[in-house]
Amino acid sequence: MTHRRESSMSIAKTAGIRPGYRLPAAVLTSLALFAPYAAFADEPVVANPPLLKALTPTVQPPVQETGSEQPRRLNLLSLPRANELSPGVAREVYFDLNIQYVNGWIRNPAREKPGEIKYDKVQLRSYAQGDGKPAKPTEPSTQWPKEGSTVYMAPEIEAYPGQTIRINLNNNLPRDPSCTAHGPDFDVNKPHCFNGTNLHSHGLWVNPAGNSDNVLLSINPGVGFQYEYNIPQTHPAGTFWYHTHRHGSTALQVSSGMAGPLIVRGTRLPTPTENGDLDTLLKPYGATAFPERVLVFQQIQYGCRDAQGKIKKDAQGRYVCDAGDVGKIDGYDQFSSWNTSGRYTSINGVVMGSLTKARAGEIERWRMIHGGVRDSIALVIRRLANDAPKPAGLKAEETQQYVDKYCTGPKLEMPLVAADGLTLSKALVRQSVTFQPGYRWDALVVFPEAGDYCVINDVKVADTVDHAVPSARLLGLVKVEPGVHEPIKSIPQYVESKLLEATKANMPADVQTKIGDELRSGLKLTSFEPHRTIDPSEVIGTQTLVFDISAGAFKVGTNDQNTQPYSPTRIDRTLLLGSVDKWELSSKVGSHPFHIHVNPFQIVSIIAPDGTDVSKDGPTADPFDDQFRGMKGMWKDSIWVLNQSQNKDGTVPPGRVGKYIVTFRTRYERYVGDFVLHCHILDHEDQGMMQNVRIALPDGAGGVASAHH
């Protein structure tokens, strides 16, 4: 293991980790195991996202006083001198993040012949490591790097509970008059300000106002702004993400790849009276490493335009770029059906790449994020046939033929341990994992034997925004090397045995018996749950929400009759700090992923048109609506609100056609301020499917406190 640690340290140095800061052993192992893009010269490799470089603080540094051995501060004399939360974990971390045009390449297998790797030339708005310079409007470069050398993947941000994260966001995009030139008839729900931006820390439980997770700001070209996230000491560890959220251009920027992982790492061990972080159980012990992959799924729907400004397409409606063209994302006419566009879902910016260095029998933690704009993903892993050719030269829809012919092994069972970054009360073992836009799932993935495995998007009708005919498209391959174990007969039993070993190695003696009993009872993770279950007796009020598309507008309301488009000057809901509400969600037209900022919620039920609660698990679980199975009692920040229409082949049961009712409970804790809820099909959000929410201080008499000046 020595060579692995040494290479990890060198990667950490490259990533800008300051000397003297010690990375956790699990992180060092993962960095070495997934060193970027090193395996195959002729195949793109899916590496973990690069870490965003942490900067040495430059605000109010100590200065040496002449003749004094101790530095003194010029200001903030009472500032604590302690600069670490724990060994190796800084109390405050500074990041510099630029937004700029990046010229590069995206693989397009539709152009390939056997043995070839072909790329399309593209120019996209992107996040990039900052250089400490102030923001400056900058026109795109006319130079391109070497073909195939660019990966459109935002860097990963790491944080810890109790830490203050400061991010200098510098908008270096060219000037955009539509960000400021608003006349009296200006329609805020018409896409605009494509070069304006802001930053959303999706899923973080932090302040929504001021310079924290404030998405009501517009950071225009040439403007820099420092976001400050004061992460509470009680914040859950988990898989979160960040992305742009400027109303009017959110979809256009996120679809360009402007989305990155934000991982909150936990070091809190469970005690007899307090729960801990799952990270502390999944620490390396002995020869077991629990390596980690962070996987961001993206749908970059770039296009090339003709002289009349129309997107170039072939006879089948697939997007095409001719020689000399540059693919761009520059209009909302590009957000048509993903399936017919012929584009490919990428993983960490790589199209149909290989995940390498997996070993049979080694449990990996996959932190998976749907960072796309609108289309669903149903992740399935199958063993690839030994005689299968390399998947080159396949049009997007033709990858299903490849899957049907060569990806023929049994579906791999994947124990899910977290949803939307929040550890589950019990691992859910699934052979298919459905991602709606904004969803995250953490899975413990183990391959029973060496060989190549297919990573497949096996979507079903009920899962998709456009109710497309089911398809199974290849996303990439996993290269699994031989391990040092007996063949695995049962993945859940094998995972249980390894977690029991980890309990003895990593957990305090006074909780080992409790955690062991929980794991033996169906892989329960009770000692690592981040939130206390909301009892029905806590509920004080009820909120209702309806999504709607009518009269050419995207709307939200409290019932079918009062839906309306977004208005930045209207507060749609005022909620009281400290209160607990039950919410009921439905969709009048179409299906939509609901997302609310700040406070997570706990699913109570998901009721199909025929009255079936499809959120149940176990023997009474419903086979048709598999994406909802086991969600009862689950904590999340995003949920699919389904209005199921019949598909072309008539396979939807009659009792499942129509509105589904999602019910959840939520607490409004700690923070007051204004924020939003919205549909996470981001072009819907940009065009009006959003509401302003205010959490206000109660006045003590059943109302809202008002300020006096």
Image (tube, helix red, strand yellow):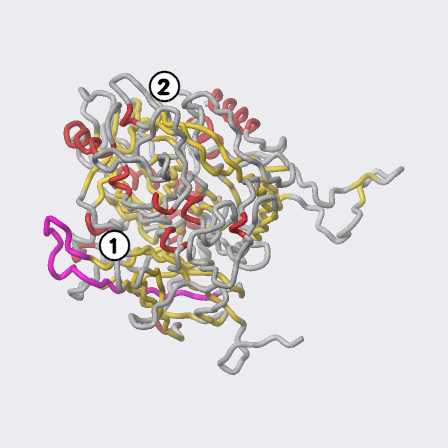
Tag in front: 1 or 2: 2
Q: Which mark is residue 161?
A: none
User: Looking at the rendering, in which quadrant would you find the C terminus?
Assistant: bottom right
The residue positioned 46% from the left and 56% from the top of the image is 274
Q: Residues within 10 Å of mark 2 (few under 14, many from 20)?
A: few
Q: Relative to 197, does residue 88 appear above or below in the rendering? A: above
Task: State the residue in front, 577 or 309.
Answer: 309
Q: Amino acid at mark 1?
A: Phe
Task: State the residue in front, 535 or 673.
Answer: 673
- Relative placement, left or right, of 645 versus 564 is left
Q: Earlier in the sequence, mark 1 or mark 2?
A: 2
Q: Relative to 345, does residue 150 appear above or below in the rendering? A: above
Q: Which residue is mark 1?
A: 628
Picture coordinates of residue 206, whole percent (x, y): 52, 56
Residue furthest to the right: 67
Q: Which residue is mark 2?
A: 40
Q: Amino acid at mark 2?
A: Phe
Residue furthest to the bottom: 701
Does residue 501 appear in the picture of this structure?
no
Q: Secondary structure at mark 2?
A: loop
The residue positioned 47% from the left and 71% from the top of the image is 574
Q: Relative to 585, does residue 364 appear above or below in the rendering? A: above
Residue furthest to the front: 308
Q: Residues within 10 Å of mark 1 (few under 14, many from 20)?
A: many
Picture coordinates of residue 471, whole percent (x, y): 19, 40
Q: Relative to 5, does residue 585 appear above or below in the rendering? A: below
Magenta part of the chain: 645-668
Residue 14 figure quarter: top right
Picture coordinates of residue 610, whole percent (x, y): 15, 65
- Give the Cα distance between marks 1 and 2: 38 Å
Contact, CB < 8 Å: mark 1 with mark 2? no
